């Protein structure tokens, strides 16, 4: 009995020693991975501010500028994360992480289908020239002056001063009459 207990104790000490050896051998890679990930985090902040400065000169809406800069910033952080996992030789974890992100993205996309459609329509509206602030438009049986275009809705002020918010998806999918760009003869 004592011999088996001593044998089990020796095996446990041996296993702990082998784990310690693996940790010591892997320590430079762990430190390098931490440095790479931290560097990508700080780089993403710089890239975000740089993109905001570059996009300030464009004619895009402010919300689209912020979202674009944030997406590029998140991409830099994700690249740093994947690079750090590659340095640690965690290819299986990386594959599982990508697969999980794909499944989560699909679930979120299905759950937020309407919101995402309005957001992408808002991005499209920020690049088109046929509707802008101050225009008098008619869309979806509403007519009025465009007072706000954001990522979710187009807000118009009707003749009687009522404010109407039309989802961007409806503005993109339905006919739009813009009286401000129609030539008057």
Image (cartoon, rainbow, N blue to C red):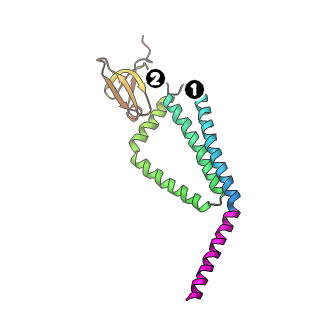
Residue sitting at x 47%, y 50%: 105
Q: Quick one: which residue is furthest to the left in this view?
A: 160
Q: Where residue 140 appears, x then y in whole percent?
A: 33, 29
Residue closer to the observer: 67 or 11: 11
Q: Which residue is mark 2?
A: 132
Q: Which residue is mark 1?
A: 56
In which quadrant is the C terminus drawn?
Answer: top left
N-term mark: 2 or 1:
1
- What element does badge 1 sit on? loop
Mark number displayed over residue 80? none
- What element does badge 2 sit on? loop
Give the alpha-carbon distance from disc 2 to disc 1, as whole Å: 18 Å
Give residue 5's quadrant in the image.
bottom right
In which quadrant is the N terminus drawn?
Answer: bottom right
Q: Quick one: which residue is furthest to the front in this view?
A: 2
Which residues, given as a range, are shown in magenta?
Answer: 1-25
Left or right: where 169 falls relative to 100: left
Residue 97 falls within the magenta-colored stretch? no
């Amino acid at each position: 009995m004592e011999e088996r207990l001593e044998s089990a104790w020796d095996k446990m000490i041996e296993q702990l020693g082998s784990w310690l050896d693996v940790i010591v051998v892997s320590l430079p890679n762990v430190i390098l991975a931490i440095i790479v990930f931290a560097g990508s985090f700080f780089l993403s902040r710089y890239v975000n501010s740089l993109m905001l400065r570059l996009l300030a000169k464009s004619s895009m809406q402010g919300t689209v500028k912020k979202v674009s800069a944030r997406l590029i910033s998140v991409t830099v952080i994700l690249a740093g994360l994947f690079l750090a996992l590659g340095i640690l030789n965690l290819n299986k974890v990386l594959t599982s992480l990508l697969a999980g992100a794909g499944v989560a993205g699909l679930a979120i996309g299905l759950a937020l289908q309407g919101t995402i459609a309005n957001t992408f329509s808002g991005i499209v509206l920020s690049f088109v020239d046929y509707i802008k602030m101050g225009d008098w438009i008619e869309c979806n049986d509403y007519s009025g002056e465009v007072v706000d275009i954001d990522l979710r809705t187009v807000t118009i002020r009707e003749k009687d001063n009522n404010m109407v918010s039309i989802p961007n998806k409806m503005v993109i999918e339905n006919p739009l009459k813009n009286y401000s760009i129609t030539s008057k003869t």
